[in-house]
Structure formats: C-alpha cells, structure tokens
Image (cartoon, rainbow, N blue to C red):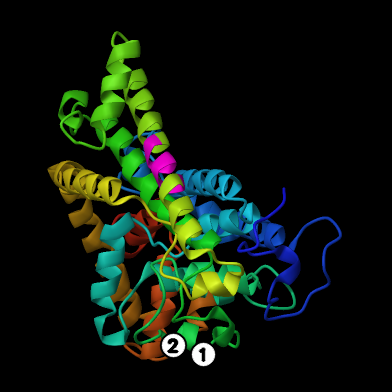
Amino acid sequence: MQLEAFACRPEESAGRLHEEPESGLRTPHQRDRDRIVHATAFRRLEYKTQVFVNFEGDHFRTRLTHSLEVAQITRTICRALALNEDLGEAIALAHDLGHGPFGHAGEAALDEALRGFGGFDHNLQTFRVVTALERRYAAFDGLNLTVETLEGVVKHNGPLRGRVPAPVAEHPLAERFALSREASLEAQVAAISDDIAYCSHDVDDGLRAGFFTIEELAEIPLAAPAVRQVRDCCGDCEPERLAHETVRRLIDRLVTDLLAETRRRLARAAPKTVEEVRDTERLVAFSGEVAAELAALRAFLHERVYRHYKVNRMALKAQRLVRELFEVFLAAPQCLPDRWRLRADEPGGRRTAETVRDYIAGMTDRYALDEHDRLFKLARYRL
C-alpha cells in the first residue's frame, strides 16, 4: 500500500539503540511487532485482569484480548488513512505490557505502596519492560525497539511537557522521542483505539455480567442508534447476539466518526511530513458531538460497571493482596526468587523497592494469588 507523505515510513526509521542487521523479510516496524508478540510480558497478559478477574468467567476480556482488539482497530484505521499499519499495530500491542495483576486496583495498590519511591504508573512500566526488563536477547536487555515504537509507547497519553520520568529522560534515545511534541499519527491512532476498544468491550462485558440491560443502554445517546438498529433487524435474538450486534455497531460508529473528523483535520492542517504532524495540534480525534457522547458513555460505565459492588469487592481484595506482597518483600527481600533477590539490597531500600515493583508488576493474577498463599498461608503449601 502506498503510504501518505505524513506517515512514518519504515525505510526512514530513526533506528534502534543497539544497531542490528536489517531483515530481508520484514520492515523494522514489523520486527517490533513480532518481538512484542513473542515477549514474555505479552503472554502474561492472558492472565491479567481488564475489569473482571480472569477466573470469574472465560468470556470476559483480559489484558491480552483487549490488546488484540486495540491492535485490530488500530490496523483498520491506519489502513483507511494510508498510515504505517505495522507501526500502529506494534504500539497497540505494547501499550499494556506494564500493567500489573488485578487491573487498575492492583495499579492503585502499587502506586500507594511506592509513594515514597516515585509511585507506579503502568505506562512508564511498559517503557521499562520493552527497554530493560525483557530478557530474551544475548546482545541487549529489553526488546531493542525502534525509536518510532518507543515514542508511541511513551506518548500513549500525549506529549510529555512537564517533568519527564527518569527512565525516559535518561534513555540514550530520549532526544529522538521529541517528548514535548505531538506523537506520530500511528501513535495517535493506537491511543484513541484503546479508548474505542475498552468502552465498547466494557459495554459487552457489562451486559454479559448482568450489570445493566439493553434497555438501559438504549438511554445513552452514543449507544441508542446501535440498539435501535439491532431491535429493528434482530429483536428476537437471544441476549448474547443482541449484545454483540449492538457492540459491533457501536465500534463502527466510533471508527466512522473518527475517520471523518481526522480527515477534516488533516485537510485543514495539510501536513506534508511526520515532523509537521509532530508540530500540529492533535489530528486524530472524534467530532465534538461524538466526543461528548463518548464521555457520557464512560460516565455510565463508571457508575454501572467499574463501581459495581462486585467489582469493588474484587478491587478491595486485590489491593490488600498486592499491598501485603509489597510490604513483605520490601521488609524481607531474601524471600524473593533468586533472580530478583540478587537485584535487591537492604530491606526497605530504594533498590529493593524498585525490584519488588518490577517483580509484582510482572505477575499474573493467578501467580500473585499463589505467591500470596506461599507467603501467608500456615497450612502446608508447595514451595
């Protein structure tokens, strides 16, 4: 496919920290995507909570299924805009690698536990994973991704115009990330595809869990046309089909509006290079009307899903478990597995806290539960 002039062209990549021979089969950004898919942190996403803990049901989203859905939406939008699909997909697949166990509840617990050590942010942890924590290659730590993919990871929430976290600021390629400027269009697409994916699939999971009904969803302006269309064409379908048909139409409306608004902004700004994109106010966006309706849908989901008492109960247990794991390892680093124990120093020290952070953040839900049992249960337990 012929890329637009403002797309990130693989042959013009700014390179990697560690030079490597080029592949005769894959572009630099295809290699990035493949390295992410083969990463240990990516496989672990299968057993990390999105909203519902993975053992609550086989059909609820996990971090892995969410990441795949974000990548699919990203690829669709990039193709429609003649952007670099492989770069967009790589950024989308990487964006949640830094999430710890138990979703945002686990993240909140880690952030509180690390308050005296700089806190915890899953986006920054993703950067640590792909630049240092993955240990697969003989010549370097991390995945040695291209500048363009790292930039997209760093700018998932937009440019960094305030204090830049040390792991990013001290990275040898930091100047090439253009931290205070807008991200590439591919990175902007991956970031907004995250919003499309989590809002739409949380509608699906909320319906499956019985937290609200199709009739209640029909009261939300963004979802109302989709529900109406589904009622007209397949009103006699069973609930599972009604939910899926509604969600697919919801995604279609969001993507269609996004493409129309982005094309309007591109025509007005007329960027001719990636550098001009970086110097232009965000170009990938929804129309004002749909942005407002999406905010209303988010508010509905916060009230009916994220703050549902069953989710709150899970969050309470998860936060206690993560907090207890952190406290015991910080006080007794000799209880860490060998690889991690060798990284730590004295009990309560910064280096120990950072080691415990990385160890816990890499855990799946079930591994965290097992590790907690190994440390706290008095009954006989397999070590």
- Marking on residue 227: none
Secondary element at image label 2: helix
Give left or right: position of 90 versus 352.
right
Magenta segment range? 253-259
Question: Would you say the magenta stretch is mainly helix, strand or loop?
Answer: helix
Crowd rating for badge 2 (residues with CA inside 10 Å; few <14, some 14–19, many 20+): few
Residue farthest along the right direction in this orientation: 24
Counting from the top left corner in percent of width and height, residue 380 is at: 35, 55
Q: Which amino acid lies under the numbered mark 2 shown in the image of this protein?
A: Ala
Q: Is residue 129 visible?
A: no
Which residue corresponds to mark 2? 166
Give left or right: position of 186 versus 372.
right
Marks 1 and 2: in contact by CB < 8 Å?
yes
Secondary element at image label 1: loop
Q: In which quarter of the image is residue 309?
A: top left
Distance (Cα) linking label 2 and label 1: 6 Å
Q: Residue at the spot x=19%, y=46% of the render? A: 296
Which residue corresponds to mark 1? 170
In reply to whether residue 254 is colored magenta, the answer given is: yes
In reply to whether residue 274 is colored magenta, the answer given is: no
Counting from the top left corner in percent of width and height, residue 306 is at: 21, 48
Q: Residue at the spot x=42%, y=74% of the render? A: 124
Image position of 266 with respect to 242: above or below: below
Q: Can residue 15 be seen in this view?
A: yes
Q: Residue at the spot x=43%, y=66% of the render? A: 156
Q: In which quarter of the image is residue 55?
A: top left
